[in-house]
Image (cartoon, rainbow, N blue to C red):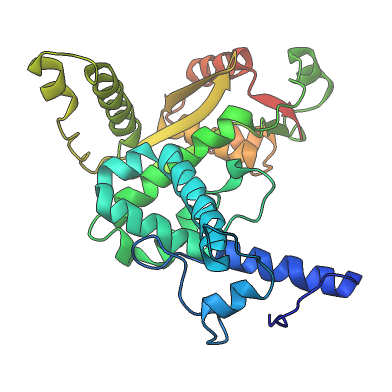
Amino acid sequence: MKLSTAARADTPRALLAFQRALKDALIRPLAPGDRTQRHWTDGRPMTEFAAAFIKPNDRLTALDRLQIYNRMYWFRLLDCFHDDNPGLRALLGGWKFTRLAEAYLARHPSRSFTLRNLCVRLEGFLRAEPRWTAPHTALAVDVARFEWAQTVAFDGEARPVIAPAEFAHRPPSRLRLGLQPYVTLLDLKYPVDDFVIAVKRRDALRTEASNATTSGPRAVASKRVPRPRPGRVCLAVHRMDHRLYYKRLEPAAYRVLAALRDGAPLTRAIAAAGASAKPDRVQGWFATWMELGWFCRR
């Protein structure tokens, strides 16, 4: 976008051009040292670009004023990315995590009115560009999936819970149950639930220790949480009474829920559990899931 030296937004078309140019300048990735890049996309000096539509004052140049908002945009996104991914940050370490955040946000800038959706594409990004998390990419993907599931559980849509009486009005071979949108099923290669919980507990200790005068709590709070070893874990991440919960599932139970989530009728979903799942076990699973309110109409 090229603006004239005397840029004026005095027509709808000119206003749109101005808005797009300003937006592109504000969201453009920062240069090293957290500075606005020194050249615009067409090669012009940023001083010239900024002067086309920003007035200086007696303290700040046009570029200085633009840089304030360029920094504010990026610092806000990085803060949100930091807060949404404590497990990933602990896994990678501060420097590597920051490089990942900058690369991800440059590739996938915020496109939503809410920062809640900032990390919606993080799992796909980690799979497509493993260099940012190597040699622990598989673990990082599991951590990212788990942390995004918490975001979904926190404020995902809740639909009316299906009543047990409704089961009687349709044969099991035709009954399809929906899973609440805020429930995420995860089949993971690592026990990342234990890892992320340990990280949050450590960070809570660190916060408490920040005002302590003894060395004991500080030493505990500064310990590195060990990376989890490989081991399959099936989880349901959900909420109840406005609180987040992580429920481990038997693999057979996970298969039943996954089949229902994917649209299988009840009989086929139960068959997915396998012959080892006895009727009393399946009955117990469904009693728990109904009590948790996980089922709704499709």
Task: Classify the position of the C terminus by image quarter.
Answer: top right
Image point 50% across, 33% down: which residue? 150
Residue 150 against residue 71 in the figure, above or below: above
Residue 169 against residue 66 in the figure, above or below: above
Horizontal side, residue 114 vs residue 41: left or right: right
Q: Report if residue 285 is visible in the image.
A: yes
Residue 73 against residue 179 in the figure, above or below: below
Residue 101 placed where, x, y %?
Answer: 41, 55
Residue 5 placed where, x, y %?
Answer: 70, 81
Horizontal side, residue 72 vs residue 174: left or right: left
The residue most toward the front is 58
The residue most toward the right is 11
Residue 255 placed where, x, y %?
Answer: 50, 37
Q: Nearer the viewer, residue 81 or 5?
A: 5
Q: Nearer the viewer, residue 273 or 227?
A: 227
Q: Quadrant of residue 115?
A: top right
Q: Nearer the viewer, residue 162 or 11?
A: 11
Residue 276 against residue 3 in the figure, above or below: above
Image point 63% across, 39% down: which residue? 261
Q: Quadrant of residue 283?
A: top right
Question: Total label count?
Answer: 0
Residue 89 placed where, x, y %?
Answer: 32, 44
Q: Report if residue 271 is visible in the image.
A: no
Image point 60% across, 77% down: which residue? 49
Task: Classify the position of the N terminus by image quarter.
Answer: bottom right
